[in-house]
Amino acid sequence: MAQRPRGAWGSRHNHSGGFLINDAGQSALFDAFLFLVISLVASAAVLGYASLTLAEDERSVRADALAYAEDLRVALMRTTLENPWYTNATGERVELGNGISVERFLVDEAQLVASGQSPDDFSVANALILGRAKSLVRLPFSVGIEASVSGPQRTAYLWLGDGVGPPTDRFTALWSYRTANSHEVDIAIHLWYA
């Protein structure tokens, strides 16, 4: 159906002082409104799809980082120390000999600290362990090692890393050890974005 303008400028004033839009103007206004609605619906669909894709990517990245933390934990715990030592309560140096694994050292250290030994007595070996851990980690991650003892009679907490503990947003590989005296020693490797 052909449309015909009502005046030279395509609009007229009505008798009550209002402004009337001709049929062509109404059609253009309707087309613009319809375009706006279609654009909003399409944008919502695209954003919804993108957020689902990002959520899947984030889960994949998180799973990869957790697997990396576990691989790092296994590699570090199997590493042997060259003649590790610590200072006992009387200030004497206690040498443990070659071939002690990081895992064995940390489990024993946590139990000794729970028995009253100062964590500072292990600072030389702990610095060596943290240095090994940092050498195994690739960018963009930072690493920290946590060891804790819980049991019926004593508890202890050790942190090897920057700051006073791990950040809240991290990837953790944890392993628990049951000791002969019914204590549980937990060793955790924490990774976070540097």
Image (spheres, rainbow, N blue to C red):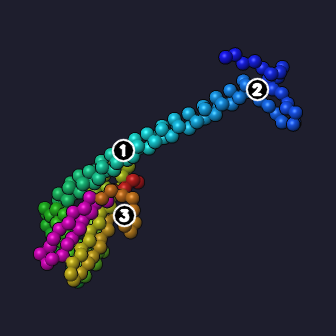
Residues at marks 3 and 2 touching, judged by CB atoms closer than 8 Å: no
Say which element carries label 1.
helix
Q: Is residue 84 visible?
A: no
Mark 2 neighbour density, 10 Å: few (under 14) some (14–19) many (20 or more): some
The residue type indicated by label 3 comes to Pro
Kindly report the distance in space between the C-alpha atoms of the residues bearing marks 3 and 2. 69 Å
Residue at left offset 68%, top offset 26%: 27
Foreground: disc 1 or disc 2: 2
Residue at left offset 23%, top offset 81%: 154
Foreground: disc 3 or disc 2: 2
Foreground: disc 3 or disc 1: 1
Range covered by the magenta-colored residues: 173-190
| Mark 1, residue position | 56
Residue at left offset 19%, top offset 63%: 103
The residue type indicated by label 2 comes to Asn
Provide residue 145's location: percent of width, then percent of height.
29, 63
Mark 3 neighbour density, 10 Å: few (under 14) some (14–19) many (20 or more): many
| Mark 3, residue position | 166
Q: Quadrant of the N terminus?
A: top right
Quarter-wise, where is residue 100 in the image?
Answer: bottom left
Residue at left offset 81%, top offset 26%: 11
- Residue 153 part of the magenta-drawn span: no
Say left or right for 43 vs 142. Answer: right
- Residue 183 part of the magenta-drawn span: yes
| Mark 2, residue position | 22
Residues 149 and 104: in front is 149
Kindly report the distance in space between the C-alpha atoms of the residues bearing marks 3 and 1. 26 Å
Find the residue positioned furthest to the top.
Answer: 2
Residues at marks 3 and 1 touching, judged by CB atoms closer than 8 Å: no
Q: Earlier in the sequence, mark 1 or mark 2?
A: 2
The residue type indicated by label 1 comes to Glu
